[in-house]
Image (tube, rainbow, N blue to C red):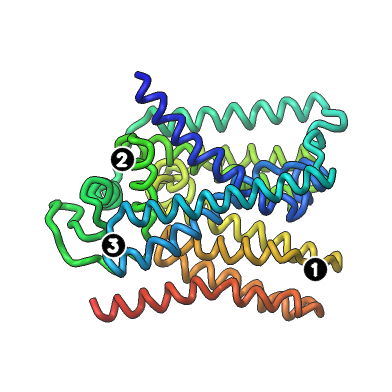
């Protein structure tokens, strides 16, 4: 029993606390688009942006390791070092801001809250808790688990990455095409560091985290689209209802979010691409207001593009198309083209992985 509690606490730390602390690097990106005033703690932005930076680092570390056929534990150790460095940087930035007296931790509790806002907030949390419970309690058939979960299990048990046939367990040559999107390896890393079985890690820990994080992204998007808190909460409740009744097909976005959230392509569709949309909405709103674009915005955008490459090989192309299309639209709408120019460099990680995919597909 105590061992299980320790495993759960490690997963909570890795999936909850670590991204939240790492996201402190981008906490002062802006308070706009949230329920909190400027210079306050924006927890959804912290949590999601921290996870994007962690995923980007894992992609950059893991793909060369797969190409060089290094052991899985070596990649895991490098990623742990990368995580510790980010944690130290975030803590250092937080201490500096605290000393400067520019952080207002109590800002999110200022102002009066109406009864209707409280009711809407309770409905939102009630529906989300129901979905999280159902995602863990119910079982469902998914043929893709025969590959993705099997790859995670083989990686964790054999200490090799994409060198094992998922359906038979026999050794084979490195699967370079699938190895360019090592989301199953990230799940294997979580299972390895926590001691939790891979199946439990994927179906419970990762699924619950991805669903909750998906709603965190939707709250950020709602903050950009709507000015009042009641409107934002109605937007989130409407999104929850769409997800609850979106299982009329195996291929809907709602079904991917609820029933397949542990898979990379589901994380891409319900988390990475919506987060990129939030970043682009933020960019256009700043350009409309004639405000300066923080450098951290471009770092976060590049991290999101790289995270899309981790989730799916197609994600690299889709994220590049989204960011590149936004750049072209911005050139037509705004005179401040200097602020749009770095957006091209944010696409470079995705372009690199797309070219690698094309090369390995042709060779294979």
Gap in angstroms between the C-alphas marked 3 and 2: 21 Å
Residue indicated by mark 2 = 198
Q: Nearer the viewer, mark 1 or mark 3?
A: 3
Would you place residue 315 above or below residue 50 in this image?
below
The residue that disc 3 covers is: 70
Query: Does residue 352 appear left or right of residue 171 in this picture?
Result: right
Which one is in front in this view, the residue at disc 3 or the one at disc 2? 3
Name the N-terminal-most of marks 1 and 3: 3
- Asked whether, in this view, residue 227 is left or right of residue 50, the answer is right
Residue displayed at 78% across by 62% down: 285
Q: Is any atom of residue 144 visible in this view?
A: no
Residue 247 at x, y percent in the picture: 43, 42
Residue 206 figure quarter: top left
Name the front one of labels 1 and 2.
2
Work out whether 54 lies above or below 335. Answer: above
Q: Could you tell me if the residues under marks 3 and 2 are in contact, i.e. CB atoms within 8 Å?
A: no
Distance CA(mark 1)–CA(mark 2): 45 Å
Task: Name the one closer to the observer, 334 or 247.
Answer: 334
For marks 1 and 3, give the CA distance. Answer: 45 Å
Q: Secondary structure at mark 2?
A: helix
| Nearer to us in this view, 79 or 113 | 79
Q: Residues within 10 Å of mark 2 (few under 14, many from 20)?
A: many
Residue farthest to the top? 1
Q: Quadrant of the C terminus?
A: bottom left
| 53 with respect to 206 (left or right) | right
Seen at 48% across and 32% down, the residue is 132
In the displayed structure, 345 sits above or below 1; it is below
Q: Which residue is mark 1?
A: 287
Q: What count of labels does the image hold?
A: 3
Q: Secondary structure at mark 1?
A: helix
């Amino acid at each position: 029993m105590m061992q299980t509690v320790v495993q759960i606490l490690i997963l909570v730390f890795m999936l909850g606390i670590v991204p939240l602390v790492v996201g402190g690097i981008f906490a002062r990106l802006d308070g706009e688009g949230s329920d909190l005033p400027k210079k306050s703690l924006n927890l959804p932005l912290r949590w999601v942006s921290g996870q994007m930076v962690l995923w980007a680092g894992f992609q950059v570390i893991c793909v060369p390791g797969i190409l060089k056929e290094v052991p899985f534990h070596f990649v895991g150790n490098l990623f742990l070092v990368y995580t510790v460095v980010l944690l130290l940087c975030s803590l250092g930035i937080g201490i500096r801001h605290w000393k400067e007296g520019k952080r207002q931790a109590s800002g999110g509790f200022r102002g009066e809250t109406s009864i209707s806002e409280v009711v809407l907030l309770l409905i939102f949390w009630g529906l989300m808790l129901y979905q999280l419970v159902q995602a863990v309690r119910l079982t469902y058939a998914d043929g893709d688990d025969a590959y993705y979960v099997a790859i995670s299990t083989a990686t964790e048990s054999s200490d090799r990455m994409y060198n094992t046939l998922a359906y038979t367990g026999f050794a084979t040559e490195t699967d370079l095409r699938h190895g360019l999107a090592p989301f199953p390896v990230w799940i294997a890393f979580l299972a390895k560091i926590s001691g939790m079985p891979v199946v439990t890690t994927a179906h419970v820990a990762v699924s619950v985290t991805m669903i909750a994080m998906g709603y965190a992204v939707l709250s950020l998007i709602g903050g950009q689209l709507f000015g009042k808190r009641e409107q934002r909460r109605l937007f989130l409740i409407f999104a929850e209802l769409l997800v609850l009744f979106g299982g009329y097909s195996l291929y809907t976005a709602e079904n991917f979010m609820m029933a397949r959230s542990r898979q990379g392509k589901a994380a891409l569709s319900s988390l990475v691409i919506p987060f990129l949309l939030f970043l682009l909405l933020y960019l256009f709103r700043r350009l409309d207001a004639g405000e300066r674009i923080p450098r951290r915005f471009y770092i976060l955008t590049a991290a999101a593009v790289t995270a899309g490459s981790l989730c799916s090989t197609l994600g690299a192309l889709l994220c590049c198309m989204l960011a590149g299309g936004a750049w072209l639209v911005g050139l037509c709408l705004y005179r401040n083209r200097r602020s749009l120019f770095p957006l091209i460099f944010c696409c470079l990680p995705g372009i690199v992985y797309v070219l690698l995919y094309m090369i390995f597909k042709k060779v294979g």
